[in-house]
Every structure is written in C-alpha cells, then in structure tokens.
Image: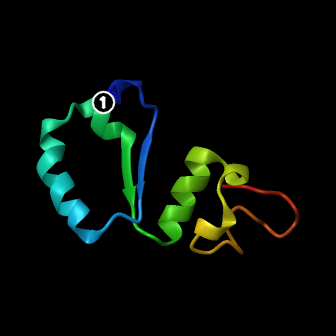
Amino acid sequence: HYPQRSFKTLVINAPTWFDMVYKIVKPLLRESTKEKITIVKRGPKQDTTLVEVLGIDSVPREILYDSNHVGDRGDGVVEP
C-alpha cells in the first residue's frame, strides 16, 4: 500500500515471466521506487545480495545457492 515506506524490496527466484511483467511496469514507477527493487535469480548473485541486505546471520543457509562459501573465509570471520 505504501511503497515509499519500504527500505528495500527483494524478489528472489521469481519465475521467468516475472521479468517480462516487470519490464512493462518499471517505466511507470518512480525512480526512488525502482532503486529499492532488486530482482535476483538463484545463484551466487542471489547469495551476495541477501548477505549484503540482510546480513549473514539473518539468511537461512537452506535458501543459499552455495551455503559453504558465502561469507565464510575459513578462519571463523564472516564477511558478505
């Protein structure tokens, strides 16, 4: 109801047709609204986006494409 109140909108694993619909709707949106929307497909970019926006501790491992490597340098230090 109030898109301007949103900090960030993530669309994860959307079906292929969603991209086509979004391309039609996108020109109708305000620039500030478009900047808040991120659409990512399953894969490394999805993992990076989720970790950057939500933080590594907030992302469930089961939804990550490669949960073994995202944010873990192997020395116990977690980074996006």
Q: Which one is nearer the viewer's eye here, 49 or 12?
A: 12
Side (left or right) of 64 relative to 69: left
Side (left or right) of 39 relative to 25: right
| Residue depicted at 42% across the width and 31% down the height | 6
Q: From the image, which quarter does the C terminus lie in?
A: bottom right
| Residue depicted at 88% across the width and 66% down the height | 75
Side (left or right) of 27 relative to 5: left
Residue 74 drawn at (x, y percent): 83, 70
Looking at the image, residue 68 lies above or below residue 40: below
Among the 4 quarters of the image, the one containing residue 70: bottom right
Give neighbour class at mark 1: few <14, some 14-19, many 20+ (Cα, 10 Å). few
Residue 58 drawn at (x, y percent): 68, 50
Q: What residue does disc 1 label?
A: 32
Residue 79 drawn at (x, y percent): 72, 55
| Residue depicted at 19% across the width and 35% down the height | 29
Looking at the image, residue 6 lies above or below residue 65: above
Looking at the image, residue 6 lies above or below residue 53: above
